[in-house]
Amino acid sequence: MNDRFTSSDLQVLIAYHGFPALSLYMPAHRITTNIDQDTIQFKNLLREAEEELAKAGVRRPDIQELLAPAQERLANAEFWRHQSDGLAVFLAPGAAHIYRLPLSFESLVKVGDNFHIKPLLPLLTNDGTFYILAVSKNAVRVLRGSKTAVDELDVETVPGSLAEALRFDDPERQLLFHTVSTPSSGGRGAALYHGHGGGATDDEKDRLLRYFRQIDKGLQDLLRDRQAPLIFAGVDYLLPIYQEANTYPHLMDEGITGNPDELRPEELHNAAWQIIAPHFARSQELALGTLGQMLATNQASTDIKEILPAAYNGRVETAFVPLYTQLWGVFNPELATVQVEQEESPENYDLYDQLAVYTLMRGGRVFALEQQILPNGADAAAIYRF
């Protein structure tokens, strides 16, 4: 079970090919008073999964073995007390991947010979997930946000304060401090400094650089392979110093100014969204503008029967797929043919999901669209590399 989803996790899911592969999505609730509602919904989805597996010809003992990891979670009260906005479960013989994620999914059960990954795309593509690094001399908080939610993460590799970061290599520091427990420090001692005002002397800047480099190093595992923006929250003179220490390529130029110790996660989220929303919208608008130009010169297409084989062969630079719409069918890579079917079955796939998978596997970019905004009422589109 995991509360994070990275491109490495996606590659694991994409790489799996074998029958049966079960993908299960459901919305969840952070508030513990909704535990019964969530467990009932999960139980119903598992019952639906049983029926789908049986219809696909899976033997009853094999169904029970496949669903065992999910059934174990059903009876685990602690698991349900710590939910996020959505639950994603991927089960196959000998493999179980369970994620509690800050994204509210539509309920879905899919049985096939690969995992259905399209609902996860907003967590990895440039359209909704971001991080907040809230830093003062007294505390460090790392938050992960989406359009509607925010989680405060426990990143053990990040120092908790300036004093903690420099306690071994700065024994002669001139600032005097004492530790107290504050709400933003999660109960652990936070060093309260006395002596410096709003600017930074050369000596203090050197200490801050060493502090920030430890924070940057501590974030590397969390942010590795990510494209999500990172927003710095702190008093104004700290941002340029952190920019000097930063190695993450997606740090935003604009930060949240002020003392973040005084802000609750929801307040930080609201401030961050004001910065990040135009960034997400601009990126998508630019891509849609390029799509319009390329369609006029036949360097793009909205025909799934053309763009799916192109994506398989690495020719798609940018794909646009509908987040909440499925198109069931079968793609034959050897013949480069696409057969669209009216209903879902264990033998077919969501062709839009396959378009996203092949595009990402070949190093392309994917926009998962929440509404129909493509030209001529199209559900999906692609811009070609050549």
Image: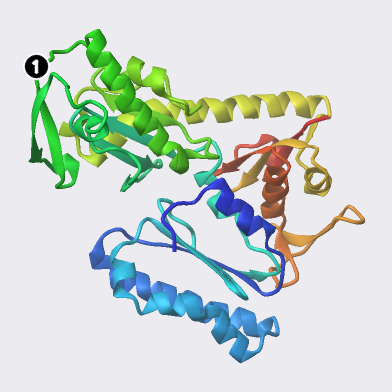
Residue 319 to residue 92: above or below: above
Residue 67 to residue 363: above or below: below
Which class describes the residues within 10 Å of circle 1: few (<14), some (14-19), or many (20+)? Answer: few
Relative horizontal placement of residue 44, taking residue 288 as reference (left or right): left
- The residue shown at (38%, 55%) is 85
| Residue type, numbered disc 1 | Gly
Residue 366: where, in percent of width, then height? 63, 40
Q: How is the image coloured?
A: rainbow
Query: Disc 1 marks which residue?
Result: 195
Q: Quadrant of the C terminus?
A: top right
Residue 34: where, in percent of width, then height? 28, 67
- The residue shown at (72%, 70%) is 18
Residue 124: where, in percent of width, then height? 54, 43
- The residue shown at (62%, 57%) is 12
Of the pair 358 and 382, the residue shown nearer to us? 358
Relative horizontal placement of residue 282, taking residue 326 as reference (left or right): left
Element assignment for label 1: loop
Residue 194: where, in percent of width, then height? 8, 21
Of the pair 141 and 384, the residue shown nearer to us? 141
Q: Is residue 353 visible?
A: yes
- The residue shown at (37%, 42%) is 144
Q: Quadrant of the N terminus?
A: bottom left
